[in-house]
Amino acid sequence: MSDLAIDRVETVLLDVPLRRAHRFARASMDAQPVLLVRLSTAGGVTGVGEGVVPGGPWWGGESVETMQVLIERYMAPILLGRAVDDIEAIGRDIQDVVANNLYAKTAVEVALHDAWARSLGVPVHTLLGGLARRSIPVTWALGTEPAPVVIEEALGKLEAGAHHTFKLKMGAQDPDADVERVLTIAEKLAGAAGLRVDVNARWDRLTALTQLPRLAEAGIELVEQPVPGPETETLAELTRGLRTAVMADESLRTPTDALRLAKLGAADIYSLKTTKSGGLRASKAIAEIAAAADVPCHAGTSIETGIGTAASLQLACAAPAVTWGSELFGPLLMREDILTTPLRYANGELHLPEGPGLGVELDPAAVRAFTRS
Ligand SMILES: [Mg+2]
């Protein structure tokens, strides 16, 4: 058996407590469920990947529980005995057995890259073509709470010098009241911070046509996914008509989606997420389509721990098109880190760790503490 052959596939479910509840339009969480996938090779190397969705299956239909079943029952038999550098063929074989479920596939695909890179003694970004940057700006996401709560949190972050831009979650209430809330926040933070909003696909076309100009007027610099994912023509119409940048997130999961968005001119910016796209290689392909279409990318998050965040960071640093910063704040939202050495955030940026593979190590005690019983 080759040193690179996979001889063990293991999954573990964690619930990692958050510092504060994180609210989306229709979901809220005070702990982030995470599925860790560990692949061991005959050569004694272990690779880790993370399966994670933002607060439950509302975003893409998957949960950590569905991922665990699919990986253990359907993907592990494909993985066992295969070499960790056989990634493209393994991906094709998994696709023959499991459709969709890109979050689960990401957990496996990232673990393969981590194990392969560690076997070679190189960082994951080397496998992706090398570095375009060594750090990336990090915006902070503010929840759907009332304006005074959000303003207080934002001012605290600004004072600490931790973040210079904020993303406001919208869509939890009536659009008029929600926009009023954002206008109040924008007025308070004007000149001090860049403000972006994420509607998480909650508005219909007419609501978006009515409300988005009000947000643009107030100086909101970016509007993320105002309308449902499949409505790419509407997204294109909004992008053409609005003087604020429009970012695609729910509309963009695969390289095919990226090509369709590019043809339609449907968005000014693409949200790149390793998690929603099936892993590092598909995300890199999306970034390359974006570059060819002259569309900048933003490194998005599904609220990953240090493992998933390190994977997204390796990709963001290896993809020249990611010029619109990131929201890779996941570990900062968690009450405790699951890494032996936390990722380094400084001066509003997340810095690439040194070292082989993802460049980070799991802390066994933290993993034990948060393992779901
Ligand atoms: Mg989003």
Image: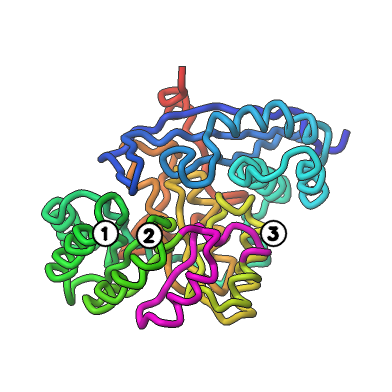
Instruction: Give the residue pinned by disc 2.
Output: 203
From what the image shows, is residue 45 above or below residue 118?
above
Quadrant location, ligand no. 1? bottom left
Say if mark 2 contacts mark 1, CB within 8 Å: yes
Instruction: Please give the label number shown on residue 127.
Output: 3
- Depth check: give the residue in front, 233 or 275: 233
Which badge, 2 or 1, comes first in the chain's sequence? 1
Q: Secondary structure at mark 1?
A: helix
Q: Is residue 370 above or below residue 63?
A: above
- Local crowd at mark 1 within 10 Å, few (<14), some, or many (≥20)? some
Q: Which is nearer the N-term, disc 1 or disc 3?
A: 3
Instruction: Give how far apart the Cα atoms at labels 1 and 3 are.
Output: 45 Å
Task: Please give the range of residues in magenta.
Answer: 228-257
Q: Left or right: 96 with respect to 34?
A: right
Which amino acid type is shown beneath numbered disc 2?
Trp
Residue 115 is left or right of residue 157, and the answer is right
| Residue 317 versus residue 172 in the image, above or below | below
Secondary structure at numbered mark 3: helix
Task: Tell me, yes or no, whether the highlighted magenta stretch contains residue 125.
Answer: no
Q: CA distance from mark 3 to mark 2?
A: 40 Å
Q: Earlier in the sequence, mark 3 or mark 2?
A: 3
